[in-house]
């Protein structure tokens, strides 16, 4: 039974440790690596809440749990153990902190529940926008360590409709390729709107975890304060929505929807180069959110300097905060990702099969996870023990030395045109008919997967399409695979095997 014997001592120990880290300029490290909440205690232990077993194990490994226990012993004279409770959802820091002298409780409630934002108009300059007196709904001053949130083994809040539920920090495995990005995103989620981490631009090739980390920020903020207005959207979707608002004369609704957001998560900003008008609107949207200390996160497939067609004033906005490069994960990180996925699913597979998957899928985590699911699904469906031989058979299309020069764009175009009963000229044409567009997307995707052609070279082979159009086709197929489109998945597998066999 809880006696709350050590609650004050625990909080004092945490505050002392925080001050130590703060005095050495490492307060963010404390936030990232001492993320525990007091729950209750007995005569010999303190139960603490932690987001996941993975994060607890990490704190133990780094020696942070020992540091807390030592500080508690120093203050109390007693040897007290810390006992973790996993899947703990803390309250929002802004809800826990007390209002300052110039903020009464009513204004804090208003700013947390329904921020009142004065609307900016395109003809207003950004300098005038920054002078507008607006409400701050995120506490940019990190609060003193406080406890007493309720334990929730499962979130009692419905998942956000736009955010993938599984894209959380606990489900992300940081490696040398992504450790800094992981820590920066975690810091942004802990203290949204902080100038140090606002905005965040994550860039890198497809399948390295950009969208996962961006959505993890959204999920973390949402579960701390579900009343905040959070939106995740791809740039192409926003472009389509903006175009429709112009056509239907409802741009005022579009403007209000996005300028009143508390958190904007915008995927694939490289496609902004297609629309100067949307760039103008996004400029004012950025200023509205940023000046109210809302959080903004972008992703791109390349560095900001390499994105053509974006106006300089918008690039300047994007360049604030953190621009972080996510690289392809190394072999050890890929193995760790496989182990983590198996842990979450409560499954196990032989070590040599794990190593085969990690060796085969070197550049795209999404494909690695898909191959793992395929292995598990096959073994369960066929009631067989998964062996290295079975794994090699199932991954034969991927193990084939794709891109070795044997497979050409012409081979892929012919295979796709035969499969869909369209001509190769159709694939190269400007036709947007669905009967042509889908085969074209698949052919372009397969060229990226099975050859060493650059994106520009692939575009040339498909009627002189530009780099961004090729990326759009690839993303179209990747999005369908990511959302579990079995029909497209089966077609990709069948065509890959057919192309491999014919070469």
Image (cartoon, rainbow, N blue to C red):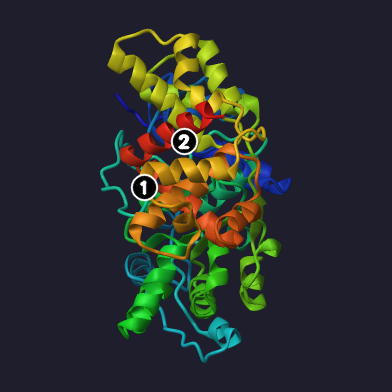
Labelled disc at residue 496: none
Labelled disc at residue 170: 2
Q: Position of residue 341 (x, y in %)?
A: 44, 27
408, 325: nearer the viewer: 408
331, 53: nearer the viewer: 331
Q: Earlier in the sequence, mark 1 or mark 2?
A: 2
Placement of 441 over or under 496, stated as above or below: below
- Other residues around mark 1 within 10 Å, as few (<14) / some (14–19) / many (≥20): few
Residue linked to disc 1? 421
- Other residues around mark 2 within 10 Å, as few (<14) / some (14–19) / many (≥20): some
Which of the image's four quarters has the N terminus? top left
Q: Position of residue 304 (x, y in %)?
A: 66, 62
Q: Position of residue 472 (x, y in %)?
A: 50, 57
Q: Secondary structure at mark 1?
A: loop
Residue drawn where x is 52% and y is 75% of the image: 275
Position of residue 229 in the picture relative to residue 321 (left or right): left
Position of residue 288 in the picture relative to residue 40 (left or right): right
Q: Position of residue 224 (x, y in %)?
A: 38, 51
Placement of 101 over or under 458, stated as above or below: below
Residue 89 in view (yes/no) = no
Position of residue 143 in the picture relative to residue 250 (left or right): right
Q: Secondary structure at mark 2?
A: loop
Residue drawn where x is 42% and y is 14% of the image: 348
Quarter holding residue 463: bottom right
- Contact between marks 1 and 2 (CB within 8 A): the answer is no
């Amino acid at each position: 039974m809880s006696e709350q014997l050590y609650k004050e001592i625990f909080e004092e120990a945490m505050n002392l440790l925080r001050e130590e880290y703060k005095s050495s300029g490492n307060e963010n490290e404390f936030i990232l690596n001492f993320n525990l909440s007091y729950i209750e205690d007995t005569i010999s232990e303190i139960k603490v809440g932690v987001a996941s077993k993975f994060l607890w194990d990490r704190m133990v490994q780094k020696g942070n749990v020992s540091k807390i226990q030592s500080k508690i012993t120093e203050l109390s004279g007693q040897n007290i153990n810390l006992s973790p409770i996993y899947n703990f959802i803390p309250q929002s820091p802004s809800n826990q902190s007390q209002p300052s002298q110039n903020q009464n409780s009513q204004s804090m409630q208003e700013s947390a529940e329904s921020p009142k934002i004065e609307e900016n108009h395109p003809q207003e300059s950004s300098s005038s926008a920054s002078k507008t007196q607006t409400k701050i709904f995120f506490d940019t001053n990190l609060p003193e360590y406080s406890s007493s949130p309720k334990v929730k083994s499962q979130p009692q809040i419905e998942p956000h409709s736009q955010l993938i539920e599984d894209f959380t920090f606990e489900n992300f495995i940081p490696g040398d390729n992504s450790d800094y990005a992981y820590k920066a995103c975690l810091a942004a989620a802990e203290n949204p709107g902080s100038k140090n981490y606002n905005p965040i631009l994550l860039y890198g090739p497809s399948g390295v975890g950009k969208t996962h980390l961006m959505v993890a920020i959204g999920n973390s903020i949402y579960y701390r304060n579900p009343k905040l207005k959070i939106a995740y959207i791809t740039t192409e979707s926003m472009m389509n929505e903006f175009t429709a608002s112009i056509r239907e004369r409802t741009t005022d609704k579009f403007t209000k929807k996005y300028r009143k957001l508390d958190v904007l998560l915008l995927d694939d900003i490289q496609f902004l180069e297609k629309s100067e008008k949307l760039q103008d609107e996004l400029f004012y949207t950025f200023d509205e959110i940023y000046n109210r200390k809302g959080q903004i996160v972008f992703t791109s497939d390349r560095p900001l300097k390499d994105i053509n067609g974006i106006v300089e004033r918008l690039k300047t906005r994007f360049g604030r905060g953190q621009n972080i490069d996510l690289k392809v994960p190394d072999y050890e990180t890929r193995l760790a990702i496989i182990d983590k996925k198996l842990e979450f699913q409560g499954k196990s597979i032989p070590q040599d099969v794990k190593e085969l998957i990690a060796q085969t899928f070197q550049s795209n985590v999404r494909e690695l996870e898909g191959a793992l699911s395929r292995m598990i699904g096959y073994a369960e469906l066929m009631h067989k023990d998964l062996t290295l031989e079975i794994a090699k058979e199932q991954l034969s299309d991927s193990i084939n030395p794709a891109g070795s020069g044997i497979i050409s764009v012409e081979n892929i175009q012919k295979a796709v045109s035969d499969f869909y009963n369209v001509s190769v000229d159709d694939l190269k044409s400007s036709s947007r008919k669905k009967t042509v567009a889908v085969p074209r997307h698949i052919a372009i995707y397969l060229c990226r997967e099975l050859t060493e052609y650059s994106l520009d070279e692939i575009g040339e082979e498909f009627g002189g399409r530009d780099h961004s159009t090729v990326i759009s086709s690839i993303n179209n197929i990747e999005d369908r695979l990511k959302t579990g489109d079995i029909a497209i998945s089966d077609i990709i597998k069948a065509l890959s095997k057919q192309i491999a066999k014919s070469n």
